[in-house]
Amino acid sequence: SAVISQKPSRDICQRGTSLTIQCQVDSQVTMMFWYRQQPGQSLTLIATANQGSEATYESGFVIDKFPISRPNLTFSTLTVSNMSPEDSSIYLCSCNGGATYPGELFFGEGSRLTVL
Amino acid sequence: GENVEQHPSTLSVQEGDSAVIKCTYSDSASNYFPWYKQELGKRPQLIIDIRSNVGEKKDQRIAVTLNKTAKHFSLHITETQPEDSAVYFCAASNGGNTPLVFGKGTRLSVIA
């Protein structure tokens, strides 16, 4: 299995500011996925991050709002830009299990953002 | 793309009874169907999964069944305990490096 360290675990942010969430994986992984979980809701995929190429965004999410970096096979960041109260959510990074656990996703601990 | 429907959204059972949560999916190419349990304030944790080459899988009090023809799969929890109280999510993907698509979740309450 993969162990993902995600930070910050939580933060309170002011409207209009930006925050970057970092995820470090303890092994090299091909794909990393960023999900958003709004209060009381399910997990919604924001984007897929592949090392060496631009992230692929799902409908409703754009790069200007959620820029993603994937500089190597063990690390990724998600920035939530120009935040508004509607961005208050838990943001989860995840990675696939590779050949050992095909399809399975391993999650970071999540970053709970509250925007005032 | 894939669409996963999950029912019910809330479920209350007496301790010791069984709980069943059902999901349907739309993409016939999906072949991997995991179930995640999320306790309050924690990340989702995989509890059981099934792949399209099997129809049923069991792990102690938890079982999952899959009907590929009908495109539905179910989670069965027997002899429920208060610690089973959580939100359960089903998901689907076509495996490999593709992301999971999640159902909307079921909030299970086990009443002692």
Image (cartoon, grey):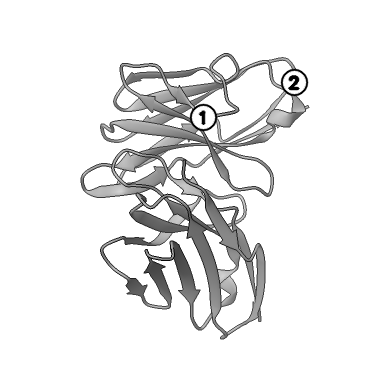
Which chain hosts label 1? A
What amino acid type is highlighted by mark number 2?
Gln
Identify the residue shown where x is 65% and y is 71%. B11
The residue most toward the left is A99
| Closest to the observer, B78 or A23 | B78
Under tag 2, what secondary structure? loop
Q: Is residue A24 rendered to the left or right of residue B78?
A: left
Task: Provide the residue designation for mark 1.
Answer: A58
Residue B78 in the image, given as x and y percentages of width and height: 49, 81
Instruction: Kindly identify the residue that appears in the image at 56 percent across and 29 percent down.
Output: A59
Vertical placement of residue B38 versus A54, above or below: below
User: Dot 2, how many residues are within 10 Å of its Cα: few (below 14), some (14-19), or many (20+)?
Assistant: some
| Residue type at the position of mark 1 | Glu
In the depicted structure, whether residue B59 falls above or below residue A91: below
Is residue B3 rendered to the left or right of residue B31? right
Sequence-wise, the earlier of marks 2 and 1 is 2
Left or right: A82 in relation to A31: right
| Residue B92 visible in the displayed image | yes
Q: Which residue is mark 2?
A: A14
- Which residue lies most toward the bottom here? B16
**Mark whose residue sits in front, 2 or 1:** 1
Q: Secondary structure at mark 1?
A: loop
Q: Quadrant of residue B19?
A: bottom right
Residue B40 rendering spot, x and y as whole percentages: 62, 55
